Image (cartoon, helix red, strand yellow):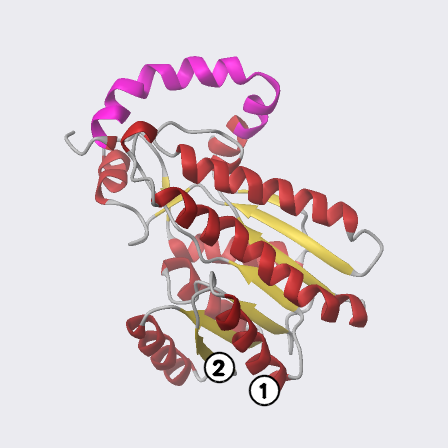
Amino acid sequence: MDLQGKRILLTGAAGGIGSKLGDMLAARGAKLCLLGRSDASIASLREQIVSRRMDAIVVQADVTDEDARAYALAEMREVFGGIDVLINLAGQLDFHLFDEAAPRMIPRLLQVNLEAPMQLTREVLPHLLTQRSGRIVNIGSIFGSIGYPGFAAYSASKFALRGFSQALRRELAGTGVGVTYVAPRAVRTPFNPPAVNMMAEQGMMHMDEPASVAARIVRAIERDAAEVYLGFPESLFVRINAVLPGVVDHSLRKVMPALARYARGWP
């Protein structure tokens, strides 16, 4: 895909990855609708548009709200005349042992990480199918292929997003509309709870910089990639886990005592 002139809706645009991704897409000539939820994120996005001279609009919207999603899409149609690419980047993270997690966390994770991308996709698909071109881009996680302790609900939501992406890609074969699933490993952003950053500092997980992840997402879109897994050895573990999950079980069992201490907040 040539991104010049492409009309792109980006959720989670004010986050660590989102802000870098917006810059890179704009540099390639894309027309952007940037979604943010809070007043602070909207102010940040507006400043970014002015400072980078981006061809973009900013919409304040909670992606879990049906009316807010409809408003964002109406704004895109009004300003740009339609949409070519939907990037579902907005996400929610929780790091707790599952029996100690807050019950309200479960529906929120599923709403943000799974239901919102599915609903947005359903809402833009008629337009993409009519023009017989476009792309849905779902940003998942390595934990959407490897169920990781401490991230049970988060992993469940990303496993489901990966399954949705795969099924939809097969459903849309031959229509001109593609589906890309990108699975980063941990990324160094404010998205992470402090305990996750501490685990990374202790060498218990690897982290990538937001700019490098954003660049890989752009490359995946330009190459019409189906699935992209970021980071080594994590991308290798995805393959091992698919074929020999017992090997990964054994490996994770060794780190479980230390991981449990971080998950409980007292490393």
159 vs 232, nearest the viewer: 159
Residue 121's tag is: none
At mark 2, the secondary structure is strand
Q: Position of residue 149 (x, y in %)?
A: 37, 27
Image point 26% across, 18% down: which residue? Answer: 257
Q: Is residue 249 magenta?
A: yes
153 with respect to 222 (left or right): left
Residue 162 position by quadrant: top right
The type of residue carrying mark 1 is Val
Give the alpha-carbon distance from disc 1 to disc 2, as whole Å. 8 Å
Image point 41% across, 58% down: which residue? Answer: 17
Q: Position of residue 219 (x, y in %)?
A: 59, 56
At mark 1, the secondary structure is helix
Stretch of the chain drawn in magenta: 238-262
Residue 150 position by quadrant: top left
Q: Position of residue 57 (x, y in %)?
A: 48, 81
Residue 79's tag is: 1
